[in-house]
Image: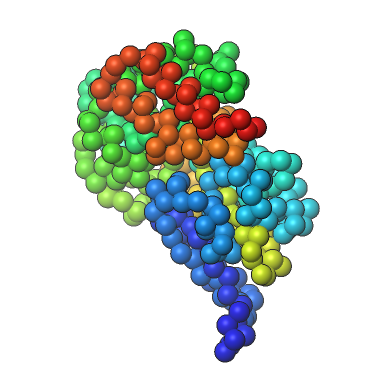
Amino acid sequence: MTAATNEIHLQGITWNHTRGLLPMVASAQRFEELHPGVRISWDKRSLQEFADQPLAELGAQYDLLVIDHPWAGFAAGSGVLMAMEDVVPPAFLADQVANSVGVSYESYRYGDRQWALPIDAATPVASWRPDLLERAGAAVPGTWEELIALARRGLVIMPGIPQDTIMNFYMMCERPGSDLFASKEIVVSDNVGIEALERMRELASLQPRAIFEWNPIAVYEAMTRGDDFAYCPFAYGYSNYSREGYARAVLHFGDVVSLDGVPLRTTLGGTGLAVSSDCKHLDLAGQYAELVAGSEYQRTQFVENGGQPGHRAAWTDPENDRRTHDYFKNTLPCLDRAYLRPRYPGSLAFQDRDGGGVPIREFMMSGGDPHAVMETLNRMYRESRGGGS
């Protein structure tokens, strides 16, 4: 509290992109107008820092935190965050459960407590430039084989940094009958993992080496700033690029390809709004959380200010599809079947930029022995569990 003005000041931290920052700033402005004497300010951090920066460090500095759901396990055991049951009313949480996009709500639940509200929902989806596909006489691929054929024409790119690589590895392993993360000793059986590695290497070999330095934003910028690439098979969706006036060219988004007749199951992302256990104004933090995550704001102002909402009412709203060339309707099936990755307390060590994506990416870039890659992944996985749950 500022002594000179008696103003209550809540500080928040989010991530540095139109989608991550602008809807939070807009919601803070509106909350201030509705609550004179309260100020909410939002700082931003890079996408890399969003994945890597320790939650305990942020919780000591900020009242409000936009977080990634793999932090849920750490939050449950550390006391850094308030359980949302202690911040917002039960009826509000019940609405959040009933209107989750896929397992977005569940992704922030750990130890039978809710550690954040899903304000943003995302998973890797397909995207394309309709004009470039038409120019090339090509169609949006529907199968893995069609994707490879399009890639052989030099029209395909995808993100290849370690974090996205490991998320796509999960996708390639999460097949019918898969044992992905069924054991505390191995990530997945060798036959499933090796097939996934070899398919990923084949696809990557048909793309520019630059992709191994690109995250989804870099891919979308390459697709919209230039005219060399017409299709991305899977990258975390950004509805901003489907909106007129946001980029030089408009991208269309939709579901990913099928493999052996079954649509691929991509790995859930998105963000949640959490409250620090050090917050001195929990009543106001809770009221603000209700505004941002509530159905009406999510369906209207959150989307209008560049956000990609987490409430189902926003994903089924015709006006939001009109703004985005049907982004929400066309990608919702992919969101609804998205895979919920592990969230045990040490899971981030396995999934961060120095984790399991590194040997996978190296194999995609340079080849080698896939059995050795699996041995490395299994060792890293066991180390990340450290005997924990």
* Percent of width and height locating residue 244: 36, 51
**Residue that appears at 49% across and 66% down:** 42
**Residue that appears at 22% across and 30% down:** 208
- Image quadrant in which you'd find residue 100: top right
Query: Can residue 143 be spotted in the picture?
Result: no
Vertical placement of residue 102 versus 89, above or below: above
Q: Residue furthest right?
A: 90
Which is nearer the eye, 294 or 175? 175
Vertical placement of residue 254 versus 171, above or below: below
**Residue that appears at 45% across and 55% down:** 15
Which is nearer the eye, 237 or 243? 237
* Percent of width and height locating residue 139: 33, 25
Vertical placement of residue 108 versus 1, above or below: above
Q: Quadrant of the N terminus?
A: bottom right
Q: What color scheme is it?
A: rainbow
Which is nearer the eye, 247 or 374? 374
* Percent of width and height locating residue 344: 60, 36
